[in-house]
């Protein structure tokens, strides 16, 4: 069941999954717009755009763009617009799609001045008895209708059907106060008519059938079955997303105080649906490596993923075929025996169809070196370690001399040491400092480390406790990683100092995908990172 839910998470992310889930109100669900788009007020847009432009050294260009806008509109062109209120639009879905209606909303401070400005630009607005305006001009090809109400101009091209007074959406419903997003958009999937959903799903079903047919004559019987089961499961999951999905949305935030640029994408399901329960369960998943990342992490990545149960059952035969193929291609009988023993020990983990893995690059240290530590979840870890030890004893003496079995211990877990310093080139030695690697295998995982502080790193990784981690977590510290490319990017150190200064955390890029009330994807970039990238690009151009 958890495997199926994890695939749902991945599919939702590929769909660019929206806004944080809210309790569904049966009384108002049918009245909700299917699409809402929102922009900050004009003042807010200019302030955020200017701030971002300043981060990349384009502040002057941003000022010129604002002045050009004012010049194009006219000296008092913005006087008729309320620059303190948000801008937006909405669409209500009709039963047949073609009978949908909506409006784009522009906040207005002076209606007469807006009409005058339009007239000054040659756009004559004709007013009907009930206050509806229309503009028909060859320059814009299609008729445009608008109405003043609620402090806004409601604008719609082609048809005035959605501009009847009874159909206008109140600003508070489309553009709630206190929402400071630079941009946001949401699609209420539950408001899309069922017949339109059915047409889309039918087309998807035909496409998935084509894919299965294209692979019908390829591969072994086991591979064909795996492809067939995978495509059918993907089709079923998409159907669940469409039929039981509630809202799909995206928002972009600029937080000048925290110097943070954020993209948030999330997806939630109808209250009480099976899909909602599965999404909620995603938030409870525990990763073995949730605490792996160190305090001095330069880069860390954690992935938790599992195939659906029905697909897992078809994976086993494919794994067996792959193992047989690798063994048969071995150079001699000795290598065949080694390969067969190793893969047979790993087979339960490979057939499980799930991955819980993490890596963490730490540093630089005082010596400007890095340490890499990582781990992968295993099934039958004891059997894997037993097989590895057996294989090592049968290796050539020269290789055995590089390995020290049970060199260290962390609690009840043995740590093995591998010395490969003589194989390091100057570049690798400048990064890791030495060629010492450590491996530890416990019942549920294999962990490893390499680099200057490898032993301490693997011990801390073994001591880390499982915890909630979501389906994906990625963290990058640009200043710390910058030293790795010092030779290729000699300007990196200077650019990092100028962009990030000595304030910790200003060089971060963070990505996460989590479950719970909604499947949520978040990307956070410190705005100083934009400045760092701009400085690097400028240095390249000036070479």
Image (cartoon, rainbow, N blue to C red):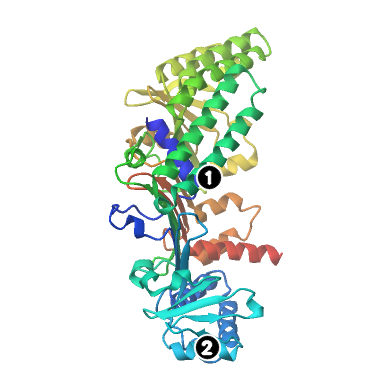
> Which circle marks residue 77 in the picture?
2
The vertical placement of 69 against 350, above or below, is below
> Which circle marks residue 200 in the picture?
1
Residue 433 visible = no
Q: Position of residue 304 (x, y in %)?
A: 43, 36
Q: Earlier in the sequence, mark 2 or mark 1?
A: 2
Residue found 42% across the figure and 39% down from its top:
240
Q: For this rendering, which residue is in front, 33 or 64?
A: 33
Q: For this rendering, which residue is in front, 465 or 190?
A: 190
Spatial CA distance of label 2 from label 1 is 44 Å
Q: Position of residue 486 (x, y in %)?
A: 61, 53
Q: Residue furthest front?
A: 129
Please tell me in which quadrant of the rendered image residue 397 appears: top right
Q: Secondary structure at mark 1?
A: helix
Q: Position of residue 409 (x, y in %)?
A: 37, 25
Residue 96 visible = yes
Q: Secondary structure at mark 2?
A: loop
The vertical placement of 151 against 285, above or below, is below
Q: Position of residue 533 (x, y in %)?
A: 58, 61
The vertical placement of 130 against 232, above or below, is below
């Amino acid at each position: 069941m958890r495997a199926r839910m994890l695939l749902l998470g991945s599919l939702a992310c590929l769909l660019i999954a929206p806004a944080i889930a809210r309790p569904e109100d049966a009384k108002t669900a049918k009245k909700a717009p299917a699409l809402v788009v929102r922009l900050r007020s004009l003042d807010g847009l200019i302030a955020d755009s200017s701030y971002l432009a300043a981060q990349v050294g384009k502040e002057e260009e941003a000022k010129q763009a604002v002045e050009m806008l004012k010049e194009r509109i006219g000296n008092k062109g913005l006087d008729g617009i309320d620059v303190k209120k948000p801008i937006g639009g909405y669409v209500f879905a009709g039963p047949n799609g073609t009978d949908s209606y909506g409006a784009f909303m522009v906040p207005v401070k002076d209606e007469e001045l807006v009409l005058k400005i339009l007239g000054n630009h040659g756009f004559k607005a004709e007013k009907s008895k009930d206050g509806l305006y229309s503009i028909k001009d060859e320059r814009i090809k299609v008729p445009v209708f608008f109405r003043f109400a609620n402090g806004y101009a409601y604008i719609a091209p082609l048809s005035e059907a959605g501009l009847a007074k009874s159909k206008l959406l109140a600003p508070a419903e489309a553009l709630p106060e206190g929402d400071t997003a630079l941009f946001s958009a949401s699609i209420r999937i539950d408001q899309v008519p069922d017949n339109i959903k059915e047409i889309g799903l039918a087309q998807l079903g035909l496409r998935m059938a084509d894919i299965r047919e294209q692979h019908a004559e390829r591969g072994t019987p086991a591979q064909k079955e795996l492809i067939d089961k995978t495509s059918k499961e993907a089709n079923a999951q998409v159907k669940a997303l469409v039929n039981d999905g509630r809202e799909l949305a995206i928002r972009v935030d600029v937080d000048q105080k925290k110097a943070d640029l954020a993209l948030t994408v999330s997806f939630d399901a109808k209250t009480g649906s099976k899909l909602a329960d599965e999404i909620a369960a995603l938030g409870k998943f525990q990763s073995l490596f949730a605490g792996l990342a160190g305090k001095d992490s330069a880069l860390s990545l954690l992935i938790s993923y599992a195939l659906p149960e029905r697909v897992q059952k078809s994976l086993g035969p494919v794994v067996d075929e792959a193992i047989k193929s690798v063994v048969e291609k071995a150079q001699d009988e000795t290598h065949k025996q080694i390969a067969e023993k190793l893969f047979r020990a790993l087979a339960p983990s490979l057939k499980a169809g799930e991955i819980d893995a993490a890596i963490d690059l730490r540093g630089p240290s005082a010596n400007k070196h890095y340490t890499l530590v990582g781990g992968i979840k295993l099934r039958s870890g004891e059997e894997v370690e037993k097989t590895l030890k057996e294989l090592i004893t049968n290796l050539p003496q020269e290789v055995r001399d590089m390995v020290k079995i049970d060199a260290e211990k962390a609690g009840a877990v043995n740590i093995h040491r591998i010395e490969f310093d003589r194989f390091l080139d100057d570049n690798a030695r400048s990064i890791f400092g030495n060629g010492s690697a450590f491996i530890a295998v416990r019942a549920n995982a294999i962990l490893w480390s390499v680099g200057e502080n490898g032993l301490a790193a693997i011990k801390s990784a073994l001591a880390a406790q499982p915890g909630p981690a979501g389906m994906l977590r990625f963290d990058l510290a640009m200043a710390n990683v910058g030293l790795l490319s010092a030779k290729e990017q000699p300007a990196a150190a200077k650019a990092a100092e100028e962009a990030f200064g000595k304030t910790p955390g200003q060089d971060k890029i963070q990505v996460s995908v989590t479950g719970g009330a909604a499947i949520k994807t978040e990307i956070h970039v410190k705005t100083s990172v934009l400045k760092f990238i701009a400085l690097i690009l400028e240095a390249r151009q000036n070479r």
